[in-house]
């Protein structure tokens, strides 16, 4: 991507200090979503990157991954699958647990999320990678469903937390911006 385009996208993301708790700098992407030009540059860039991957579906992680993922899926003319937190999906699910700082969480997809496509090629997407725990579990979930996670894509990589290093054992990782 051209540096000037990358800068437009980068500038559209707002830093909120001490949210949701002290010491955290929260990357607020709502200011990217409400900037039509910057958002279009981002989705066009991703569509260009993934056009020749022959993807079957895009899976987006709740909840900001839904926004980027469904925009991109529509652009590529393929289906979108929401990876949700436990207890939100109405039909039979498969799930994967992962540990948090305190306790455990769980992500789920519907058992028929990838329809009847054999070895479906999936791009997993979320807004941001921090420790990588959520994406790691979501990627395992895709494997459990006998689909193939061909890449995991983030808009933002918080490089210092090294979440991408761990995730690379499961699938290639691409991030548009690094902080
Ligand atoms: P992790 O599992 O640690 O990689 O956390 C990733 C999830 O937490 C993503 O869905 C992000 O939306 C959210 N998240 C973690 N840290 C931040 C941050 N500094 N700013 C915005 N979102 C964050």
Image: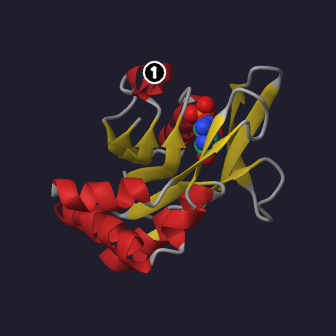
Residue 80 vertical position relative to residue 133 in the rendered view, above or below:
below
Percent coordinates x, y for residue 141 in the rendering:
57, 40
Most foreground residue, 124 or 111? 124
For image coordinates 75% across by 20% down, the residue present is 101
67 left or right of 151 in image: right
For image coordinates 45% across by 21% down, the residue present is 160
For the C terminus, the image quarter is: top left
Most foreground residue, 94 or 53? 53
Mark 1 and ligand 1: say if the CB distance to the nearest ligand atom is below 8 Å: no
- Mark 1 = which residue? 160
Q: Quadrant of residue 175?
A: top left
Percent coordinates x, y for residue 80 in the rendering:
50, 68
36 left or right of 47 in image: right
Is residue 5 in view? yes
Percent coordinates x, y for residue 46 in the rendering:
29, 62
51 left or right of 105 in image: left
**Rendering quadrant holding ligand 1:** top right
């Amino acid at each position: 991507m051209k540096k000037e385009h990358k800068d437009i996208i980068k500038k559209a993301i707002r830093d909120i200090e001490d949210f949701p708790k002290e010491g955290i700098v929260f990357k607020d992407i709502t200011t990217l979503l409400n900037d039509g030009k910057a958002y279009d540059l981002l989705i066009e860039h991703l569509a260009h990157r993934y056009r020749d991957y022959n993807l079957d579906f895009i899976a987006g992680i709740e909840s900001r991954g839904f926004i980027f993922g469904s925009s991109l899926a529509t652009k590529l003319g393929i289906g979108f699958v929401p990876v949700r937190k436990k207890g939100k999906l109405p039909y039979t699910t498969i799930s994967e647990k992962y540990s948090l700082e305190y306790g455990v969480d769980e992500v789920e997809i519907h058992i028929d999320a990838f329809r009847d496509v054999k070895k479906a090629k999936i791009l997993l997407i979320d807004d941001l990678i921090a420790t990588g725990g959520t994406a790691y579990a979501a990627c395992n979930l895709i494997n459990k469903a006998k689909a193939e996670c061909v890449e995991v894509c983030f808009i933002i990589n918080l490089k210092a937390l090294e979440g991408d290093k761990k995730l690379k054992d499961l699938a290639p990782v691409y991030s548009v911006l690094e902080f």
